[in-house]
Amino acid sequence: RIRKVATRIARYVADGHKVAVTVSAMGRTTDRLISMAKEIMPRPSRRELDVLMTTGEQQSIALVAIMLHDMGISAESFTGEQAGFLTDSQSGNARIIEVNPERMLKAFERVDVCVVAGFQGKDADGNITTLGRGGSDLTAIALAAALKADLCQIYTDVDGVYTADPRIVPNATKLAEI
């Protein structure tokens, strides 16, 4: 899947575009990390869960950037904090206060692709925060707005927007429009 994502990005770069990409953790990584924490303690602190859960997205950004490098495309990875996401302090369900993409804009002077970890940011005290489920899509939309992007496309492992997660809710229905 990483190669498939990188190939899609490569097409945009070949057309002369600078590309900001937001990625999520792979597969069931977040669920696996939460399970590991709960094996140690049934109710771990939300703050420590945020620190743990963001490692899944950090794996993804590095791997996508490495794949792009292998394809000859200049890329740099960014955590939510590095991408300029400032949130409130609500661990596990933080709200974005602002996005300052200055560091990414400087990176675009030397690279064609900035790969950003979705789902995460930092609060005013420098604590890592997560945006809750669906946070990577929210990250992509907020980043596109902050960068004044011409286009924001969201690719996912489901074929549309459903009334619930179809992997969990068997009778979830696909919405024709929103």
Image (tube, rainbow, N blue to C red):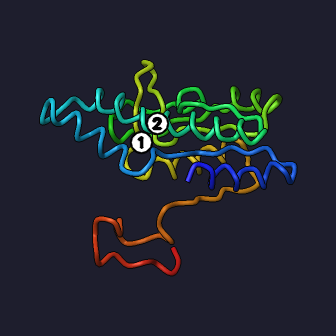
Residue 131 badge: 1
Q: Amino acid at mark 2?
A: Gln
Tag 1 secondary structure: loop
Residue 15 x/y as whole percent: 86, 54
Q: Nearer the viewer, residue 46 or 53?
A: 53
Kind of residue at badge 1: Leu
Q: Residue at x 33, y 75 (%)?
A: 172
Give the residue number, with chain letter if any, for mark 2.
Answer: 120
Closest to the observer, 73 or 38: 73
Left or right: residue 78 versus residue 58 is right
- Give the left or right position of residue 111, taking residue 163 as reference: right
Q: Position of residue 77 (x, y in %)?
A: 62, 32
Label 2, residues with CA under 10 Å away: few <14, some 14-19, many ≥20 = many
**Quadrant hosting residue 128:** top left
- Could you tell me which residue is drawn at 71 percent across and 42 percent down? 147
Q: Residue at x 46, y 78 (%)?
A: 175
The answer to which of 99 and 53 lies nearer the viewer is 53
Residue 57: image location, x then y, percent: 47, 38
- The numbered mark, 1 or 2, whose residue comes first in the sequence reads 2
Left or right? Give the position of 79 relative to 147. left
Q: Is residue 73 above or below residue 128?
A: below
